[in-house]
Amino acid sequence: MKSLTILRISFLWIVICAILFSCAGHAVREKTINKPIILFWTRNVEGLTHMTHIAKGVWAGDPRKHPDGNMLNHQDTWMAKGVTPLVWAGGVCYIDESLDKFVERWRKKIRKGARALQIDEYMPQSPMVTAKMVKALEMIRREYPTLYLAVWHGGVLTEPLISAYAKYVDLVILEDYFTDNPLGWLLFSVNTQRARKGHIIDKTIFGLEISAESWEAQKRYLDLQMKWIKANAPEMNGIGFFAPKADKTSVLGAEKLAVHYFAAGSPSP
């Protein structure tokens, strides 16, 4: 009788944990879908007041099992601040592996507690490889329906990936890094048209690069890029920044521009 009681309690605890994890994941998805997005991949987060998504160094799991136990970048720390924390998961860098091994890398992150993944990255590949990429997204969405899933996409959007993004992904970040050249503007235009035609433009944002240059050296072209996006892709729900080497001044300057263009009612920079 005692053993039966213990089994019942254990089963009840498993069910409760499953419900809590599911609700937490659902909350992340619901919280981020309609809010204007300002996403950063940067180590210089101090002073950012409008960031909605963080994509640099986020981790999940038991702090006792982390190399340094530093809670500053733990997903729970960010969620308590109202920021969506994206845990890194490899994309085409692991695509030569079998499909199950490829997806298992993502599963491991989720089993550790990740509530939101960023796949880094997807891009146009051969039809066979693309089919594997699509299948991986399908599998992870079927297995974890409440997971918040973001994908960094490099290059031109292709029909098979657009279709997969429409079905399985919450956020597509287009990696269009350039200063001010014709090819960069062409990629902006082509990807905007394809995202709109594929009905994913409302879950797509452009990811711009903030470089190691001074803020004065890059403010002009970042301003031009955001102005173009606001004018030509008004359905897009925000902006992202890849800024691994940018200094604090540039990061804060970019956020100020982002607020001006993408946060309703914000003052001019």
Image: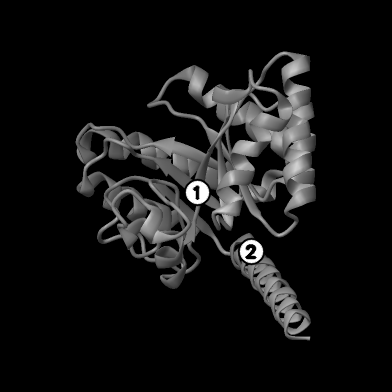
**Residue at 34% across, 45% down:** 42
Pointer 1 residue = 87
Q: Position of residue 82 (x, y in %)?
A: 46, 69
Residue 25's label in the rendered image is 2
Q: Where 186 sits versus 11, above or below?
A: above
Left or right: 197 in relation to 58: right
Q: Position of residue 174 (x, y in %)?
A: 56, 35
Left or right: 166 in relation to 156: right
Q: What's the residue type where badge 1 is placed? A: Val
Q: Mark 1 or 2 closer to N-term?
A: 2
**Residue at 65% across, 35% down:** 192
Residue 237 seen in this snapshot: no
Q: Where 7 sits versus 173, above or below?
A: below
* Mark 1 nearby-residue class (10 Å; few <14, some 14–19, many ≥20): many
- Dot 1: what SS? strand
Q: Position of residue 229 (x, y in %)?
A: 54, 42
Q: Position of residue 225 (x, y in %)?
A: 45, 37
Q: What's the residue type where badge 2 is placed? A: Gly
**Residue at 42% across, 26% down:** 178
Looking at the image, which is closer to me, 111 or 116?
A: 111
Q: Quadrant of the C terminus?
A: bottom left
